[in-house]
Image: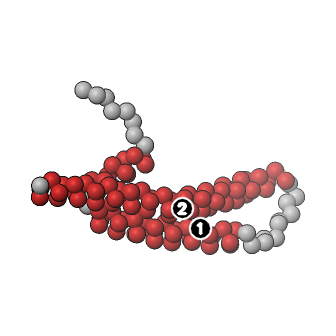
Amino acid sequence: MQKRGRTSLFEDLLIMATRLPWWIDLMIAVFAYIGFHLWHVHFLHEMNQMNESVPVPVATNPAAAIPSAVNTGMARGGIVVGNIMTEVFQYAVPALFVMGSISSAIREHKNETQKMG
């Protein structure tokens, strides 16, 4: 028996999408686009707030400002990474489900023609 190697998330989602009916794949694609787009807009809103100028406090001891700077940097880093990921996912995930719907429609059409003939 052939041993199956590890598959990526992309491959697993594509396999799942090809097993669903084509119309469900299209519905998932539409809802995934809307969901990731709204999430992306949320991150854009957070980034706009992040880019507003804030007065820099003057610290008497520069070492005391390090924890605050690290926490601020980590919080902003998450917003930037989330913005990039949702921008990619809002197009990649729906495209994956559209490919799955095309595959499902072809498979259903092939099964119907074999039943007729």
x and y, in percent, of residue 115 in the image: 12, 56
The residue identified by callout 2 is 86
Ranked by sequence position, the earlier of labels 1 and 2 is 1
Residue positioned most to the front: 117
- Side (left or right) of 39 relative to 15: right
**Mark 1 crowd level (few <14, some 14–19, many ≥20, 10 Å Cα):** many
Q: CA distance from mark 1 to mark 2?
A: 8 Å
Q: Residue at x 37, y 51 (%)?
A: 14
- Side (left or right) of 35 relative to 108: right
- Side (left or right) of 29 relative to 76: left
Q: Amino acid at mark 1?
A: Phe
Residue 75, can we see it?
no
- Side (left or right) of 56 relative to 101: right
Displayed quadrant of residue 58: bottom right
Query: 97 or 75: nearer the eye?
Result: 97
Q: Amino acid at mark 2?
A: Thr
User: Disc 1 on helix, strand or loop?
Assistant: helix
x and y, in percent, of residue 114 in the image: 15, 53
Query: 41 or 64: nearer the eye?
Result: 41
Displayed quadrant of residue 35: bottom left
Q: Are marks 1 and 2 in contact (CB under 8 Å)?
A: yes
Q: How many labels, in total?
A: 2
Q: Residue at x 35, y 66 (%)?
A: 26
